[in-house]
Image: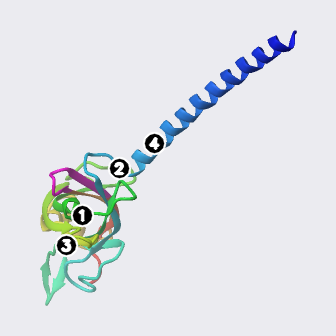
């Protein structure tokens, strides 16, 4: 092969490899962008919520109002010798973040929480509502995270276990003091909208053990 032919062949080889390297770079960049977008949530809002803490507290009896990461829900509580049923409370701590890490949240990015949903799940797969677990339900919220501007953390309180749930199957059967316990995971979905009307959602879970605990 002449020097000229060798030079042309080398040039073609560099062009081919250069094209392949550029294509590989495009693919890697695309994959990285997809991964990043998945990590910072979906939806049209430029902001999203991080659930930093989800806790529950008994509504009555000993240690009522004391929040923790696991809830021992008492299906019936003795108050001055009278059987009483209390709802149990939940509390979610939230932090407002921007999908663009270089952006700072403004008043328009504040998220007003409007609604929540609670669903109970058993790890053994027995999840028939009204038979194995209490019925799921919805409730309203009325708090804004990120207002006033610059305040990017906040919390919302809600009912984690309704009084009705303790008065119907399967929880009502636990009131007899037979020592039975129903262990569940409460999945709590919090719904809100930023000030431009874009939907924002965040989900958390907390252990809830139902029984007739000592008062």
Q: Which mark is residue 106?
A: 1
Question: Where is mark 2, residue-wise?
Answer: 41
To which residue does mark 3 refer? 148
Secondary structure beneath label 3: loop
Question: Which residue appears at 13% of the width and 90% of the height?
Answer: 80
Residue at which label 4 appears: 33
Give the colour scheme of this rendering: rainbow
Alpha carbons under labels 2 and 1: distance apart: 19 Å
Residue located 24% across and 83% down the image: 64
Residue 74, image x, y percentages: 25, 74
Up/down of 121 relative to 4, above or below: below
Q: Which residues are magenta?
A: 192-203
Going from N to C along the chain, the mark reached first, 1 or 4, is 4
Tag 4, which secondary structure? helix
Asked which quadrant contains residue 60, the reply is bottom left
Determine whether label 3 and label 2 are within 8 Å by CB: no
- N-terminal of the pair, mark 2 or mark 4, is 4
Most frequent secondary structure within the magenta stretch = strand
Alpha carbons under labels 2 and 4: distance apart: 13 Å
Q: Specify the quadrant of the image occupied by residue 84.
A: bottom left
Q: Residue at x 86, y 14 (%)?
A: 3
Residue toward you, 78 or 11: 11
Element at label 2: loop
Q: Residue furthest bottom?
A: 80
Q: CA distance from mark 3 to mark 2?
A: 24 Å
């Amino acid at each position: 092969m002449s020097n000229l032919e060798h030079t042309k062949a080398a040039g073609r080889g560099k062009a081919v490899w250069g094209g392949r390297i550029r294509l590989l770079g495009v693919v890697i960049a695309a994959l990285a962008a997809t991964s990043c977008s998945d990590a910072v949530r979906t939806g049209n809002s430029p902001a999203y919520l991080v659930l930093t803490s989800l806790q529950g507290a008994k509504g009555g009896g000993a240690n009522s109002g004391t929040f923790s990461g696991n809830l021992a829900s008492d299906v019936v509580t003795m108050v001055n010798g009278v059987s009483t049923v209390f709802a149990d409370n939940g509390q979610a701590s939230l932090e407002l973040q921007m999908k663009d890490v270089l952006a700072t949240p403004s008043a328009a990015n504040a998220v007003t929480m409007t609604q929540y949903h609670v669903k109970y799940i058993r790890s053994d797969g027995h999840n028939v509502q009204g038979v194995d677990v209490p019925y799921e339900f919805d409730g309203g919220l009325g708090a804004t995270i990120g207002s006033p501007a610059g305040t990017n953390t906040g919390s919302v309180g809600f009912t984690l276990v309704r009084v009705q749930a303790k008065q119907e199957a399967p929880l009502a059967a636990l009131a007899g003091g037979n020592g039975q316990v129903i262990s569940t995971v409460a999945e709590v979905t919090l719904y809100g909208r930023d000030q431009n009307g874009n939907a924002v959602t965040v989900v958390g879970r907390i252990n809830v053990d139902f029984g007739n605990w000592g008062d």
